[in-house]
Image (spheres, grey):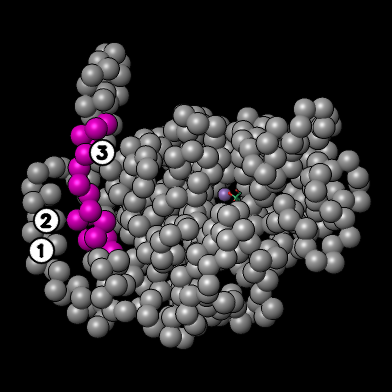
Amino acid sequence: MNISDHNGDLLGKHQRHLQFLLSEISVPGDLIQKLKDFQIAIPSWALGTGGTRFGRFSGGGEPRNLEEKIADVGLLHQLNQSSGAISLHIPWDIPTDPSATKALAAQHGLAFDAVNSNTFQDQPNQTHSYKFGSLQHVSKATRKQAIDHNIEVIKHGISLGSKSLTVWLSDGSCFPGQLNFRKAYQRTVESLEEIYAALPADWQLYLEYKAYEPNFYSTTVGDWGASYSMVNKLGPKAKTLVDLGHHLPNANIEQIVSILLMEGKLGGFHFNDSKYGDDDLTAGSIKPYQLFLIFNELVDGMDAKGMNHAKDVGWMIDASHNVKDPLEDLMQSVEAIQMAYAQALLVDKHALDQAREENDVVKCQEILQAAFRTDVRPLVAQARLELGGALDPLGYFRASGKRAELIKNRGEKTVATGL
Ligand code: PSV
Ligand code: MN
């Protein structure tokens, strides 16, 4: 079964839903085009089944190498037409032949998004250990090794056509007294300055923050304040990256996003959802209203600055799933993100501004929730249809037996291992 046959079966119902929606609410004329332009990068590490420290229960047909990861993102993009970029983590994914890798990605219609460095794990044959940090480390030689790694990652990115480096540091401390906070901060900034100096002119450096894990007492880049102050010191090419799972419970992420945008320092975004910590669950699966409120600030803040929604922030999913088919999980995440974006585009801004000026709190809530409670799925599906994707990517994926095909080509599921 091909995509257009599957679409053909669903078309009548889709058109009825779309017509009903368009007759009920006023939809901005450029909304579908904005949805079509909005691409969300897929991390190469989201294509296999995740796990916890207690065990991993792998499904079958997972990609075994970079080429197969690219093929999986290609399939996703073919179905939703909105996952047109892949983000690599080095050294998890080192392209041995960058021009061949680039050509393969291009065949699937994919570009390379941010490249990610990894100084949170020791690698075989590594001279210095990151047990006590990397860019913050007390030893200059260890810091240098971590700096050199980041510069190496930039070189890999250049060979693939990436335009940004994402730095996430697990650096911090596990116990009170272990670390001189000021020295750790200053060493981190000095190290970042060296990495920044190696960035090509048209590149950006995104500095991701995270409250805790794997360090459980302090994290050196632990919140947006730490990241923001550091990227300000580095210069215009450095910006903060917001990962939705990296905040302390109940943090007002939409307010953080609003301030970073206003300051011109929101660089990148990692979508996921969480109930407790950095749970890396499917975007929109736990707190869809929060995702909508974040998008409401993103749209408002970007419009205030005349920014291009699709291009001026790096959008990416950073999720991992223990019990779902990875591709199905990603389809759900992409759709949830698109829905939140579409709902944010439906907010009656003029009425909201007026209600705010009149301190009409009740009306403000009514306006936001009128947009949030609109079933925008026909709009998202229409955008996909116009781009040549599937009206129902998940339904098509299941009906066409794609996973069975992948299992046949790549192998059965592996035996679950516990601890
Ligand atoms: C860390 O929790 C993080 O969010 C960073 O983005 C890493 O690069 C990624 O997850 C994968 O470990
Ligand atoms: Mn992340």
Residue 372 painted magenta: yes
Task: Mark 3 or mark 1: name the one nearer the start of the chain.
Answer: 1
Please give left or right for residue 222 compared with residue 183 in the image: left
Badge 2 vs badge 1, beta-carbon distance below 8 Å: yes
The residue shown at (53%, 72%) is 415
Q: Position of residue 72 (x, y in %)?
A: 46, 73
Badge 2 vs badge 3, beta-carbon distance below 8 Å: no
Badge 3 vs badge 1, beta-carbon distance below 8 Å: no
Quadrant of res 331: bottom left
Please give left or right for residue 376 compared with residue 129 in the image: left
The residue shown at (61%, 67%) is 161
Does any portion of residue 171 appear in the rendered image?
yes
Labelled disc at residue 372: 3
Q: The residue under label 3 is which amino acid type?
A: Phe
Q: Nearer the viewer, residue 174 or 287?
A: 174
Labelled disc at residue 13: 1
Q: The residue under label 2 is which amino acid type?
A: His
Q: Nearer the viewer, residue 148 or 347?
A: 148
Q: Position of residue 322 (x, y in %)?
A: 47, 58
